[in-house]
C-alpha cells in the first residue's frame, strides 16, 4: 500500500516541487497551504508522514507540532520539518515538540528521499509493534475473561456458615484458583490452589486442575466414595499428561460436614490453613502430602479438624506470606497469622485484614505473585 504524505507549505512553488519529487517515488501526496488547513486534514484523514514548513500564516509549524503532540491519536504521525531556518535553536525546538527530522531549504532531492524513506520505515516498524502489542493485550484480556469464568461468581452461603474469597492476580491472568461447592449428604467442598508459574501458561494449567478436581469430586460422590479421592485422581491425570511441563501445583482441599462442623482435608504442598479459635488461639492444618505433578504414585494422607461455633478457617496462597517490602524482606507466615487477630464477625473481614497487612508491608508496590484467599466461618 502506498504511503500517504501531507505536504504543508504556504508557497505554491515549494508545495509543487515537493509533491512532484514524492510522487515520482510512488507516494500519494496531498497539499495544505497553512497550518490550519493541515490540522483540518489530519483530523479527518490518516497520513503516514507530514512534511511541515515552519513560517506560515494562520498557524505556523510550531503551532501544528504542538497541536499534534497534544492529540493522543495524531501524536503518532511522524513529521519532518522543512524550513529555511537553520539555527540550532529552531531545530531543537522542533524536536522537543515531536518532529522526527529536519530538512533545510533549498531541498536536496537525495537527502529528501533518504529522510522520507527512513522515517516511513521507522513508522512501519512502530505500527507493527503497536499492532502486535494490541493483539497480545486482546489475547490476555480474553484469557483473563476465560479464567474468571472458571472461578465461582458466588460462593455457597449455607445456613449457620459464611464463606468469603479474595483474588488478587499479579498479572492479567493468574495461576491461583479457589472454589467451594455443595456435595451430597450436607457437605461442602473447599479448595484453593497455586500453580508454580505465572501468566497464560499458569492460567491454563489452573483451569485444567480446578476442573479435574471438581469433576472427580462429583464422580466420587456419585459412587458413594470420599470426595478427597479427587486429589489423587487429579494428580494421576496431570502427571501422566503434563509431567514434562515442569509445572507443579499446590492444593488445599477439604470436605466440611455442615451439620457437625467436622472437616476432613488434604494439604498437597500448600501453606498451612489457619483454624482460628476463641481467645486468639489457632490450629495450623499442616501439609499432609506432596504437591501435584511431582509423582504419579504420590500418596496423600487425610487430616481432620473440628469447627466449634465461632471458629473460622482461613486458607491463602504463598503470595501473601512471600510478599516483599522495598528491601526484599518477606511478610512471612507468622505476620500473616498475627494480622488475623481474634475471629472477626465476618469471613470477609478476615481476608481484608490479610490484604491490609500485605499492603502495609509492601507499601503499595506491585505484587510479585498472585494472592488468593478463602475463609469459612461457623456462626456463634
Image (cartoon, rainbow, N blue to C red):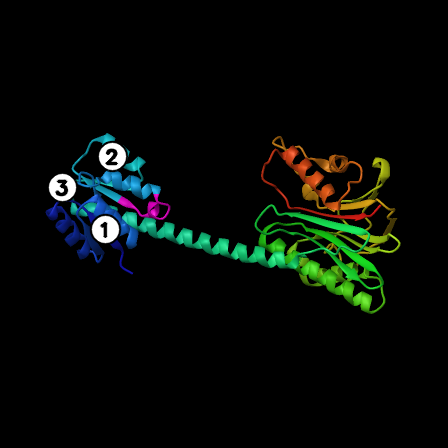
Name the residue nearer the viewer: 88 or 182.
182
Residue at point 41%, 51% (across, down): 130
Quarter occupied by the N terminus: bottom left
Span highlighted in magenta in the image: 71-79
Q: Residue at x 89, y 54 (%)?
A: 260
Counting residues from the start of the chain, the first of labels 1 and 3 encountered is 1
Q: Residues within 10 Å of mark 3 (few under 14, many from 20)?
A: few
Q: Nearer the viewer, residue 101 or 113?
A: 101
Looking at the image, is mark 1 or mark 2 nearer the viewer?
A: 1
> Which residue does the numbered mark 2 point to in the structure image?
91
1 or 3: mark nearer the eye: 1
* Residue corresponding to mark 1: 6
Residue 106, labelled with which disc? Answer: 3
Pick out the residue farthest to the bottom: 223
Mark 2 lies on a secondary structure that is helix
Q: Is residue 21 left or right of residue 349?
A: left
Q: Is residue 208 left or right of residue 119?
A: right
Per the image, is 371 magenta?
no
- Residue 66 screen position, x and y as percent: 30, 39
Q: Position of residue 232 (x, y in %)?
A: 79, 60
Foreground residue among 329 and 280: 280
In three-dimensional space, the C-alpha distance between marks 3 and 2, rounded to whole angstroms, equals 16 Å
Mark 3: which secondary structure? loop
Q: Residues within 10 Å of mark 1 (few under 14, many from 20)?
A: many
Amino acid at each position: 500500500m502506498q504511503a500517504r504524505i501531507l505536504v504543508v507549505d504556504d508557497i505554491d512553488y515549494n508545495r509543487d516541487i515537493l509533491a512532484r519529487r514524492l510522487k515520482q517515488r510512488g507516494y500519494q501526496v496531498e497539499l495544505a497551504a497553512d497550518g490550519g488547513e493541515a490540522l483540518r486534514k489530519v483530523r479527518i484523514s490518516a497520513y503516514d508522514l507530514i512534511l511541515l514548513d515552519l513560517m506560515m500564516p494562520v498557524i505556523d509549524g510550531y503551532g501544528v507540532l504542538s497541536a499534534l503532540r497534544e492529540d493522543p491519536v495524531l501524536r503518532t504521525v511522524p513529521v519532518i520539518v522543512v524550513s529555511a531556518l537553520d539555527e540550532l535553536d529552531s531545530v531543537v525546538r522542533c524536536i522537543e515538540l515531536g518532529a522526527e527530522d529536519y530538512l533545510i531549504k533549498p531541498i536536496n532531492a537525495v537527502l529528501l528521499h533518504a529522510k522520507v524513506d527512513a522515517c516511513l520505515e521507522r513508522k512501519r516498524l512502530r505500527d507493527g509493534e503497536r499492532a502486535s502489542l494490541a493483539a497480545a493485550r486482546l489475547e490476555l484480556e480474553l484469557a483473563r475473561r476465560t479464567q474468571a469464568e472458571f472461578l465461582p461468581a458466588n460462593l455457597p452461603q449455607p445456613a449457620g456458615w459464611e464463606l468469603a474469597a479474595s483474588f488478587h492476580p499479579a498479572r492479567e491472568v493468574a495461576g491461583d484458583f479457589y472454589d467451594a461447592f455443595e456435595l451430597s449428604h450436607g457437605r461442602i467442598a473447599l479448595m484453593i490452589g497455586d500453580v508454580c508459574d505465572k501468566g497464560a501458561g499458569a492460567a491454563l494449567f489452573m483451569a485444567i486442575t480446578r476442573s479435574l478436581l471438581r469433576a472427580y469430586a462429583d464422580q466420587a460422590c456419585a459412587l458413594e466414595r470420599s470426595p478427597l479421592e479427587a486429589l489423587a485422581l487429579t494428580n494421576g491425570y496431570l502427571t501422566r499428561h503434563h509431567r514434562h511441563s515442569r509445572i507443579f501445583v499446590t492444593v488445599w482441599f477439604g470436605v466440611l460436614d455442615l451439620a457437625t462442623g467436622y472437616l476432613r482435608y488434604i494439604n498437597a504442598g500448600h501453606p498451612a490453613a489457619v483454624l482460628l479459635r476463641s481467645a486468639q488461639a489457632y490450629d495450623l492444618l499442616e501439609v499432609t502430602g506432596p504437591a501435584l505433578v511431582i509423582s504419579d504414585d504420590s500418596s496423600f494422607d487425610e487430616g481432620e479438624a473440628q469447627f466449634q461455633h465461632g471458629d473460622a478457617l482461613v486458607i491463602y496462597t504463598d503470595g501473601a506470606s512471600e510478599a516483599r517490602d522495598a528491601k526484599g524482606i518477606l511478610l512471612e507466615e507468622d505476620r500473616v497469622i498475627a494480622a488475623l487477630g481474634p475471629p472477626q464477625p465476618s469471613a470477609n473481614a478476615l481476608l481484608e485484614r490479610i490484604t491490609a497487612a500485605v499492603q502495609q508491608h509492601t507499601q503499595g508496590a506491585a505484587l510479585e505473585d498472585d494472592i488468593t484467599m478463602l475463609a469459612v466461618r461457623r456462626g456463634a
